[in-house]
Image (cartoon, helix red, strand yellow):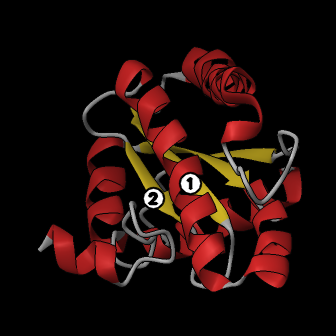
Amino acid sequence: SRAAVIEHSPTPSLPGIGEASRIIAERFEASGALGLLLIDAAVVSSIERRHGEEARERALGVLAAVIQDVARERLKPQDLVVAGEVGRSEVIVLFFRKPGSAAFYRTEMPGFGQAVNRALEQRGNKVFYPYLRKPPELWAGISVAIRNPKYGAASQLRELLEAARADA
């Protein structure tokens, strides 16, 4: 159930990428292309060091809520927002499109990242308050792949994650 997925998620309000891997693979197969936007919230690690794990989880939960608000306005129903792997302070947005959607990947994906930044700026220091006094700088990386049936979807997803982390 969704409640069980959320309980074991590294970000309480989002399913983890591991728990969503079957759904991701199915949607990747069906669409033929996958765009991945990784939002690196490593700044949350400093919150954990100073205020503890519960504070880290609250901060990531607030960040996830901001990203989900933007997602409700901009994403298609098949797209997903998930938490990164356990131990990583990441929120990942997965865009499932047809392989011929090059314009989408050039404009819409970066536009989503910009919309998240605007939403964070509008909330100012409230995003991570009381743990941080000013809005943090978050890094985002983008990667895109056409589904290659020669490789498993999980292998391609791993490569996408690594490429997005390198891009962040």
Q: Residue furthest left?
A: 1
Q: Which image quadrant is residue 51 in?
A: bottom right
Residue drawn at 75 percent across, 25 percent down: 121
Residue 72, relative to residue 19: is it above or below?
Answer: above
- Give how far across and how far down residue 47 sits, in percent: 79, 70
- Give how far across and how far down residue 9 sits, in percent: 41, 77
The N terminus lies in quadrant: bottom left
- Crowd band around label 1 with a 10 angstrom C-alpha radius: few (<14), some (14–19), many (20+): many
- Identify which residue, 32 or 124, lies in the foreground: 124
Residue drawn at 31 percent across, 80 percent down: 7
State how many labels appear.
Answer: 2
Residue 99, relative to residue 103: is it above or below?
Answer: below
- Crowd band around label 2 with a 10 angstrom C-alpha radius: few (<14), some (14–19), many (20+): many
Residue at disc 2, secondary structure: strand
Residue drawn at 31 percent across, 54 percent down: 29
**Residue under pointer 1:** 92
3D distance between C-alphas at marks 1 and 2: 5 Å
Q: Which image quadrant is residue 137 in?
A: top right
- Give how far across and how far down residue 42 sits, in percent: 81, 65
Which amino acid, by three-letter code, is at mark 1?
A: Ile
Tag 2 or tag 1, which sits nearer the N-term? 2
Whether residue 152 is visible here, answered yes or no, is no
Q: Which mark is residue 82?
A: 2
